[in-house]
Image (spheres, rainbow, N blue to C red):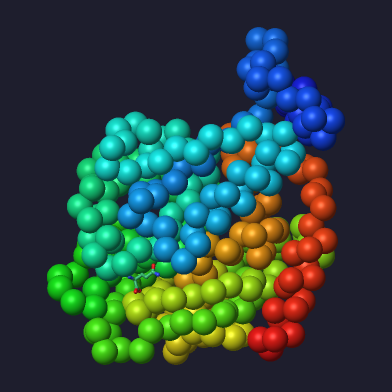
Amino acid sequence: MEGQETLKLASVQAMVLEQGMYPASFVTPVTPNILVMELIIGWLYPKLMSTYGDRGNVICIKRRCEWRGIPVSILPLDQGSEASEFCQADVIVGGGAQDRQQEIVMRDLQGAKAEILKTQLDGGIPGVFTCGSPQLLGHYYEPALGQRIEGLGLLDMVSKHPGPDAKRCIGNVVFEITASPLREELEEMIGEPPVVIGFENHGGRTYLQSVSPLGKVRKGYGNNGEDGFEGAFHQKAIATYSHGPLLPKNPFIADWLIRTALEKKYQEAINLQPLDDRLAPQARTAMLKRLE
Ligand code: GLN
């Protein structure tokens, strides 16, 4: 792959889009040596796992790519998918689910599908996983009622629901990303320590073993309301209890995912074209004022 030419073409893609010209032929290779960058978002079990606005994460990645002239396709990875499709995603998004849906997902996410997903994430494919899906990436999740659901064991952690009468962890959450090297990479992008504003709603409590926490809670419950940790970080996979407005509220994380996915796919340094994000910091400042 010709690195320079791919990069140049990415800027041309963005310019063409800005000027309102976007011929379909533009997404195909224009010469045998020049590839137009594009991304495939693998969306885990969209019908079973997408609570509390989690689809917002998918939409946000897609739109922020398209505003830069990077075509995106969304690939559902679910019961109807072949295991081989799990290899095609450049970035993976997994949302939350009720206990019952989590159990259905784990009945399907076995064998080759499970192995491929683990290999992809272990190999540095970036992803964002919310609430119910990180519970399934850990060793197990014990639901409010019924049998323990065995997870993929990718994240060294366990999750347990204390039972149907236990208080749910609901509300706005603020946490500072501490996981390295994510923290440093985000700080370089935004010029300040990365603070995430989110919303959580879970009954399960997660207890980390050797996996790194994603961050430190400033406001809210985080993993369990006890140890002050929020989420987990493994290779390039972000696991969090913060639901689907996560990326629109914290667009620098969306850009980190896009950049990381493109760098992995095209094996070269990527500089994303800046977008007009003036509204997001205003919304963040207002929320922080209200919460802290
Ligand atoms: N069922 C899980 C719990 O209550 C996950 C909930 C969710 O994804 N919002 O902890």
**How far across and how far down the image is residue 64, in percent?**
68, 46
Q: Residue at x 15, y 73 (%)?
A: 146
The quarter of the picture where residue 199 lies is: bottom right
Furthest residue to the left?
147
Residue 238, above or below 30 = below
Residue 136, above or below 4 = below
Please say whether residue 240 is visible from this viewpoint. no
Please say whether residue 194 is visible from this viewpoint. yes
**218 relative to 11 in the view: left or right:** left
Q: Residue at x 46, y 66 (%)?
A: 52
**How far across and how far down the image is residue 9, in percent?**
77, 25
The quarter of the picture where residue 38 lies is: top right
- Quarter of the image with the N terminus in it: top right
**How far across and how far down the image is residue 252, in percent?**
70, 58
Residue closest to the eye, 291 or 257: 291
Q: Residue at x 50, y 54 (%)?
A: 55
**11 relative to 244 in the view: left or right:** right
**172 relative to 86 in the view: left or right:** right
- Quarter of the image with the C terminus in it: bottom right
Q: Quadrant of ligand 1?
A: bottom left
**How far across and how far down the image is residue 126, in percent?**
53, 49
Residue closest to the eye, 286 or 270: 286
